[in-house]
Image (spheres, rainbow, N blue to C red):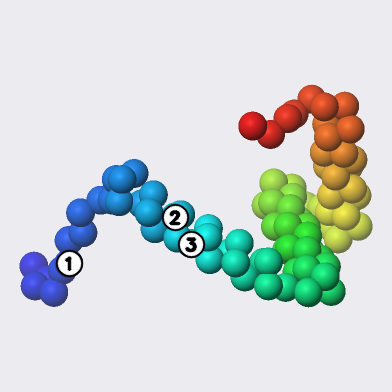
Amino acid sequence: MWRGAHYFQPMNDTDIKPMADAIFADKVRRARALTIGERIDTSIELFEGALGMMRDGIRSQFPSLDDSGVESMLRKRLGRLRQVAEHGIYRPA
């Protein structure tokens, strides 16, 4: 038996909520401090990161696709997302 084991009690919602609220408030403060140019740069980085994750998901789902096939599937999925947004099929709460 390994004697250096540490056991952690699982956190419940009442433990997590104050921490999550503090993290969110810090993110809002940092975002408000950005210049317009920094906000644009940040949004581009976030979008490119999301595209990368979508590409990775497509490659995982369709391992036989080459790069052009992945890009084609990505454009198709983005088109579907745009259709959903434009037709109001999904409305965030």
Label number found at residue 69: none
Mark 2 and mark 3 residues within 8 Å of each other at the beta carbon: yes
Q: Is tag 1's residue or tag 2's residue first in the polypeptide sequence? A: 1
When asked about the image quadrant of residue 28, the answer is: bottom right
Task: Judge left or right: residue 79 versus residue 11.
Answer: right
**In front: label 3 or label 1:** 3
Quadrant (top left/top right/bottom left/bottom right) for the C terminus: top right
Residue depicted at x 84% and y 49%: 74
Label 1: which secondary element = loop
What amino acid is at disc 3? Ile
What amino acid is at disc 1? His
Relative to 1, does residue 83 appear above or below in the rendering?
Answer: above
> 10 Å neighbourhood of mark 2: few (<14), some, or many (≥20)?
few
Relative to 66, does residue 37 appear above or below in the rendering?
Answer: below
Label 3: which secondary element = helix
Q: Which residue is mark 3?
A: 23
Relative to 54, does residue 30 appear above or below in the rendering?
Answer: below
Q: Residue 41: x and y, percent?
A: 81, 72
When asked about the image quadrant of residue 66, the answer is: bottom right
> 10 Å neighbourhood of mark 3: few (<14), some, or many (≥20)?
few
Label number found at residue 6: 1
Q: Residue 43: x and y, percent?
A: 78, 63
In front: 19, or 60? 19
In front: 41, or 10? 41
Q: CA distance from mark 2 to mark 3?
A: 5 Å
Q: Residue 17: x and y, percent?
A: 39, 49
Task: Judge left or right: residue 39 versus residue 25.
Answer: right
